[in-house]
Image (cartoon, rainbow, N blue to C red):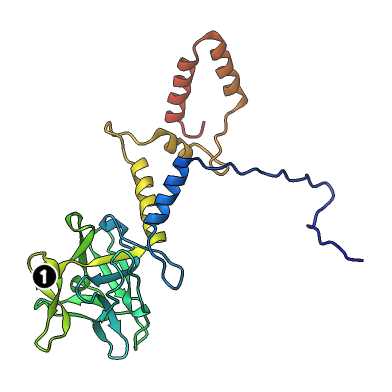
Amino acid sequence: MSVRATKLSFKGDKPSKKRKRKQRDDGDDDDHAKDDADSGPVDESGERWVTPANPLELRGPVFIFHPSEPPLAVAYDTGRSKLSLSPLSSDTSAQEMVPAQVSHVWVCTRVAGSETVNLRTGISTASGAPKFLGCDAHGIVAADREARGPQEEWTPVVLDDAGGMVAWQNAFNGKYLAVDETAGGSMALRGDSETIGFAERFWVKVQDRYRKEAREERKKAEKKEVDPMGFDDEEESNKTFQTWGAGRTVVSNADKRDIKKAKKEGRLQEALLDRRAKLKSDRFC
């Protein structure tokens, strides 16, 4: 005789209702498909890599590569403890390109109160501490410092006319990061370009979850903006300063009676204005 396994239940529990899923209409399917198409390619770890729409979306792990032939990823060579340009597959388009190695990933952090960012290695170095990408006054680009200063600060410039490519301007010398061919025929990074051309344009990708965080923060900031008259959002102020118990709005029985009475007498708006003036004058009422 076989025993059927059932879900554990307790006496007195109410039976759960089965919910029916509604089919999305064609419009919802199109929006969902658009989100999937915009989410970007997936790497081996399951993370999606997408192109940022503005500099504020540059945060967390980033993947920087130049659209040369073959494409070159800005990487950190742990064996030689120096900056390098790692060739990528030429068969993959820029939209489908993802990091092939951990050394291709950098971590972007924003300098507080500034438009500049820092780029540090996302892989463990020989010393155990991350190295920051920097440029000196002569345009020599390196990643050999464990501390960040003006030389390690970069201002990302999103180029709308180039499909969202990014130019990196160093905060120390004001010059742009570029790819240049050396005397031996190899490619290297330089930081002494004064104008933005093909050599100064890089593709930059971020992980989708960090871009979503940036967009959610921007939406929240837009909602909290002060209105043109100079007053804050009154509803948010009431929730912050005049509520308790996890943000519950507590109304006394006397207030409820007064509001009901005013509604019957046809002076509801007047009563609400009186209560509003009282709340603004006394936060403990």
In-image side of 184 versus 147 (left or right): left
Whether residue 133 is visible: yes
- The N terminus lies in which quarter of the figure? bottom right
In-image side of 256 versus 44 (left or right): right
Residue 55 picture location, percent across and down: 26, 58
Q: Please tell me in which quadrant of the rendered image residue 79 appears.
A: bottom left
Of the pair 155 and 188, the residue shown nearer to us: 188
Residue 7 picture location, percent across and down: 78, 57
In-image side of 47 versus 263 (left or right): left
In-image side of 92 versus 200 (left or right): right
In the depicted structure, whether residue 268 falls above or below residue 7: above
Label 1, on which residue? Answer: 173
- Residue furthest to the front in view is 91
Q: Please tell me in which quadrant of the rendered image residue 172 appears.
A: bottom left
- Residue furthest to the right in view is 1
Which residue lies at the image location 56% right of the left edge and 44% below the top edge? 246
Which residue lies at the image location 45% right of the left edge and 72% below the top edge? 45
Residue 143 picture location, percent across and down: 24, 80
Whether residue 240 is visible: no
Helix or strand or loop: what does disc 1 sit on? loop
The crowding category of the residue bearing disc 1, from other C-alpha atoms within 10 Å (few below 14, some 14 to 19, many at least 20), is some
Of the pair 255 and 93, the residue shown nearer to us: 93
Three-letter amino acid code at the position of disc 1: Asn
Which residue lies at the image location 20% right of the left edge and 75% below the top edge? 69
Residue 264 picture location, percent across and down: 57, 11
Which residue lies at the image location 46% right of the left edge and 39% below the top edge? 241
Q: Please tell me in which quadrant of the rendered image residue 210 appears.
A: bottom left
The image shows a total of numbered marks equal to 1
- Residue furthest to the top in view is 265
In the depicted structure, whether residue 39 falls above or below residue 130: above
